[in-house]
Image: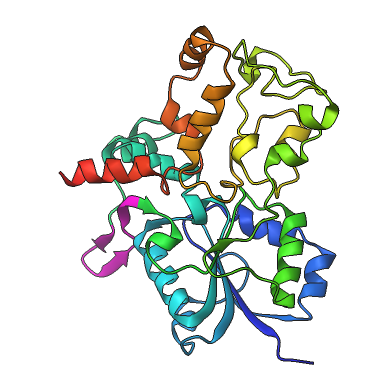
Amino acid sequence: MADKVKTAFLLAGGCAGCEMSVVDLSEGLVDALEALEIVFWAPTVADVKYSDLEAMPDKFIDLAFVDGMIRNSENLHTVQVLRQKSKILVAFGACATLGGIAALGDLHTKEELFSQAYKTSFSTDNPDGIYPTPDYMLDGKYHLTIPTFLDNCSTIDQVVDVEYYVGGCPPHPSFVGKLVGAILAGDLPPAGSWLTGGKAVCDICKRNPAITGQERLPVGEIKRTIDGQPDFEKCLLQQGYMCFGPVTQGDCGASCLNVNIPCRGCGGPIPGIKDFGARCVSTLASSMANDATAAQFIEKYNNMAKMFYRYSHTASNLNHKIAQRKEQ
């Protein structure tokens, strides 16, 4: 048998959900391990240290997956080291590729974030208002350090070169299985590509009017999921529920739509879209019947940045403009 593919997994600033999608392959993962050699999986699965990664020769790892965004100094350092040690690096999941939900924190100041986390939340007992200190000397003799909270989130490709991208929050296990198979077969597109089936959520959604033979009509009334239960048989967007299915990769199998929840874009943009949130605005606006419908939408969804850039703020033009304003 040929040499096994030396494989690594690294969790940066994420929740480990993407790694659980790999574990959810179940027996399929066991089969894949016949061709894979896991040489590093931290900090979630294997009992290894970052020093073990640092000690590896450069380009020792054939294939590395990173999930999570860059949120602190530890994330930054470990991703840079993994890049140095790997031949192929895959940004795995919404946080790694686009920023993810946690990156919406960049729409607030660091003081606002820390105050909410360590002072003002209802479950916090911190009368002295103490914040985490990256470097601290305890009792004059114990030098304690923790990672430094960075000023902004970054996607993986904003700090190192990335060969491939995989969307999803998390990527769907069935697609992960296909992905592993394609990697082992060497059936990969050019570097810089998204590894995707290439179809939008709408293309595989059983509610799509084009599939069911219904006429696609302008949206006349805007609804939120709290306004009532949508009809399981009809397109959610046609019913007035804002759904990002037309512009989102459908590698998830339309999972949210299958349980009556509108798509919010965690799969990432379909090929060719540069700014996911901007395309969502354009697509939804063009589906509305008139100005009154648009006004109703603005009234019901009063935080457009967090609506349209729920998963993709860090990778967006909006974020770049905010960063430029901060620099000024």
User: Toward which corner of the image does residue 323 lie, by quadrant?
Assistant: top left
Q: Position of residue 51 (x, y in %)?
A: 45, 81
Query: Is residue 142 rendered magenta in the image?
Result: yes
- Give me the residue at 71% from left, 60% from top: 176
Q: How many marks?
A: 0
| Part of the protein shown in magenta | 134-152
Identify the image quadrant of residue 239: top right
Q: Quadrant of the N terminus?
A: bottom right
149 sits left or right of 122 in the view:
left
Q: Which colour scheme appears in the figure?
A: rainbow
Nearest the viewer among 276 and 258 is: 276
Main SS, magenta region, reads: strand
User: 170 or 75: nearer the eye?
Assistant: 170
The answer to whether 53 is drawn above or below residue 243 in the figure is below
Q: Residue at x 69, y 20 (%)?
A: 238
Residue 74 shown left or right of residue 49 in the figure: left
Residue in the picture at 67% in, 82% down: 5
Q: Is residue 37 magenta?
A: no
Q: Position of residue 167 (x, y in %)?
A: 60, 52
Q: Is residue 299 above or below residue 311?
A: above
Q: Is residue 129 visible?
A: no
Name the image quarter holding residue 207: top right
Q: Quadrant of the C terminus?
A: top left
Q: Nearer the viewer, residue 293 or 64?
A: 293
- In the displayed structure image, the side of residue 251 where residue 315 appears, left or right: left
Examine the rendering and report whether any part of residue 159 can be seen: yes
